[in-house]
Image (tube, rainbow, N blue to C red):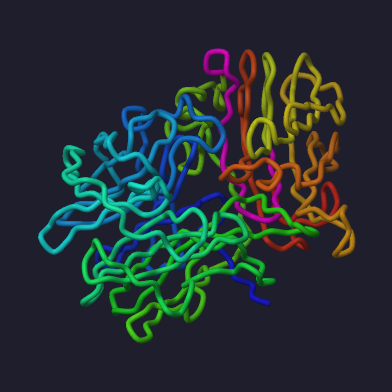
Amino acid sequence: MSTQRPVVAGFHPDPSICRVGDTYWLVTSSFEYAPGVPLFRSDDLRSWEQAGHVLDRPSQLDVSAAGPSGGVFAPTLRYHDGRFWMITSNWSDEGGQLLVWADDPAGPWSDPVRIPGAIGIDPDLAWDDEGTCLMTYAGFGPGGGEGIVQSAIDPLTGEVLTERRWIWSGTGGKFPEGPHLYRIGDWWYLLIAEGGTERGHAVTIARGPSPQGPFEASPNGPLVTHRGTDLPVQNTGHADLVQRPDGSWALVYHGVRPRGSSPEWHVLGRETFADEIGWRDGWPVVTGHVEPATVADAVVREELSGRELPPSWVAASAFPEEVLSHAEGGRLVRPVGDRPAFAGRRQEHLYARVRARVSVDGVGGLSVRIDPQHALDLEVDGGVVRAVWAVSDVRHVLGERDVGGEVELGFRMAPTEGHEFSTARGPDRVLAGVEGPDGLEVLGEVDGRYVSTEVAGGMTGRLVGVWCARGAVVLRSFEYAGSDDPAVVGGGPTGPEPWAR
């Protein structure tokens, strides 16, 4: 069985890529979290480092009204005529497509041009042989059906220059979306996702003599799909092609790593994978996987007292600066108005350990969550810390203990137990408690399926971080350690601790 691993792990869906010289640049969706549109850089497609975010300030992005899985949907990143362009949809502010540009992808990026006359998602940019900018996106055709539509636009003003034209509806799968248009040789190729972003997800491709088609589907069937297989990576779709400097090609796309008994659950969200591409009779075909350069365990001791937060940190429905401020020896976390605040980082490994030292004057603490209603919270209130399980509208206290003043809270995302077909076998076990000299004192444990996308719904994955519902929380330190090897993390609440403090 394949051991394919993501090249960008954790909740990083809908990848789009471009190459300039020897450097590859990649962006992914961010939904309700800000800063928006994470940006990554690589020189080999195998090792990626986060270079920041494209939408890194409030003048570019408003997610204040974005609930779970609202906000920024699939972006497209392109390089044309000496300039980088990024287009995406902010589904929460009704302003239409959002287009920014930069001379240097590391920033600064421009304030956005909005395109309110093009209602749909997953916009793509391409330039035809005359230099006209074409925006291709998932929308509704003249008859009302879903498919891929296209208009010419002025990318500097957002003016829509032509009527919307229906160009393709895919090969029969539901939700044709995520289009990318390319001129390769004598043909225009249209790459899309279809089949829904669950187990039926697929990448299909067509070609035609012009960017408007007519488009003919590949006779080889889907370019990528894992539906109906026992491969450990599933829900594969939403792809983008890139050519290497030596002329060879590769494909980036997202997928999930489900675990547990049937129907299985994934907890990390949709992650970015990559495949090698060859060409046969003028059509792209997958020839193998691009594996990450290393699969080493990760230890992240993040410094939170400096002027800049680590690029991995985001906030829900707000920018981190709106909920996190400087405090002596750490960060002060406060609610936004009457709305609880959450800021944190993605869980990027199948198994993980999280520690945070906090002081709480009010109500708050540490959380591992898909969204506020699907989470395991460590809640400090009035000198008591509680492990609180949130599932839908129910918040259930699993255990509690008295604490005084500053406290170190911890989570373990540990291997599950049970035989292959046991209904008790979820994707992992999430343990929550207080860190002490003998390891983690567990106050509560939940089956990881209850903090999974299949249970919560939506488009995101787990994040771990600090929250505050009332008053203030001072975050003194934060540490994340992860591994895809269950033997490294261990099965108990403490397990063998491979990451020395």
Furthest residue to the bottom? 281
Furthest residue to the left? 130
Nearer to us in this view, 358 or 500: 358
Q: Is residue 206 above or below residue 123?
A: below
Image spot of residue 476 (x, y percent):
61, 29
Q: Does residue 425 show up magenta in the picture?
A: no
Q: Which residues are magenta?
A: 335-355
Image spot of residue 494 (x, y percent):
82, 48
Image spot of residue 425 (x, y percent):
84, 55
Q: Is residue 228 above or below residue 169?
A: below
Q: Is residue 231 left or right of residue 114?
A: right
Please name the residue shown 52% across and 56% down the image: 174
Q: Quadrant of residue 393?
A: top right
Q: Quadrant of residue 163?
A: top left
Please name the residue shown 69% across and 46% down the image: 452
Please name the residue shown 72% across and 23% down the image: 406
Quarter in which the N terminus is drawn: bottom right
Q: Does residue 340 show up magenta in the picture?
A: yes
Q: Is residue 289 above or below residue 48?
A: below
Please name the residue shown 56% across and 45% down the image: 459
Q: Is residue 434 left or right of residue 280?
A: right
Q: Is residue 144 left or right of residue 440?
A: left
Nearer to us in this view, 60 or 320: 60
Image spot of residue 105 (x, y percent):
29, 50
